[in-house]
Amino acid sequence: MNTPASREGNLIRYIIYFIGYLMAAGTVKLVTINLPIRLWDLILFALISLMVLLFFIYRFNREQRFFDRSFSGSWLGNFGMTISLTLVVTALRIGVSWLQAYGKVKPYSFQTLYLQHESVKMYWFLVVALGIILPILQEFLITGFLFNYAFRRNTMFTAVLGIVTSGILFSLLNWQMSLPLLVINAVFGALFAWSYLYTQTMWMPVYLAVVNGIILMIMI
């Protein structure tokens, strides 16, 4: 039950992690519903998101003791790969924004929300919440823990299945009422998952997800 080799334990742990993520995402929803932004809602968001983030990091690092980490390294260990993936994410995000500007792809729901309640406080909250905090939590949930529990076998089929599954989950967690946006989000999620398998370090997909989130907020 206490190791990633236990299916029952993995299921229980993953449910707990998922509930933790929902709590953090719920506080984001709470802040954006009760407009103008209220101080106590921000405090609640900060406390819950920080608690869940620290819990995720602690649990992920603890579970790495049960894996062969001989191939792991720093996300800056391959500087060329880091720069290349950064450019790919940036180019893809700019391309999506270009399509939105010309009406070929619908805007994200939070973009519509911001335009309806435009304010400096709202903008910076979205940058922190949707650009940094939630992307980090999502990568731990649908890349780190997911591969640790469900896609541990060292085969090409398992890797591809894990990448596709992670992409789909990333799209679902960032649900949009638009099929093109769902597909676009799935592509980003799959790219982040691939970067995790390639580099064998959790910090690469986390870094890329934050880069994607911040660029998305800048182009709101």
Image (cartoon, helix red, strand yellow):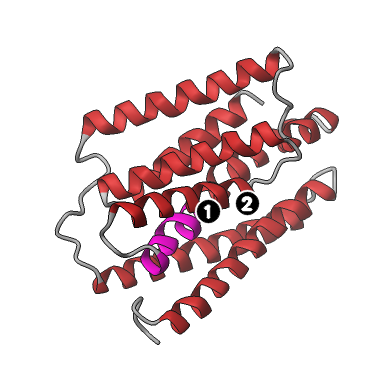
- Name the front one of labels 2 and 1: 2
Residue 77 shows in the view: yes
Q: Is residue 111 left or right of residue 24?
A: right
What stretch of residues is rendered in magenta?
136-150
Residue 62 among magenta residues? no
Query: Marks 1 and 2: in contact by CB < 8 Å?
Result: yes
Which residue of the protein is positioned furthest toward the top in this rendering? Answer: 102
Query: In the structure shown, which secondary structural element does the residue marked by tag 2 occupy?
Result: helix
Residue at the spot x=74%, y=26% of the render? Answer: 106
Instruction: Say which of 21 and 160 sits in front.
Output: 160
Query: In the structure shown, which secondary structural element does the residue marked by tag 1 occupy?
Result: helix
- Residue 183, given in percent of the width and then of the height, sits at 60, 36
Residue 148 among magenta residues? yes
Vertical placement of residue 190 versus 143, above or below:
above
Vertical placement of residue 12 versus 200, above or below:
below
Quadrant of the frame with the C terminus: top right
For the residue marked with disc 2, what is the amino acid?
Leu
- Residue 79, given in percent of the width and then of the height, sits at 22, 32
Report the predominant secondary structure element of the magenta stretch. Answer: helix
Circle 2: is it few (<14), some (14-19), or many (20+) Cα within 10 Å? some
Q: Quadrant of residue 67 in the image?
A: bottom left
Q: Quadrant of residue 102 in the image?
A: top right
- The tag on residue 173 is 2
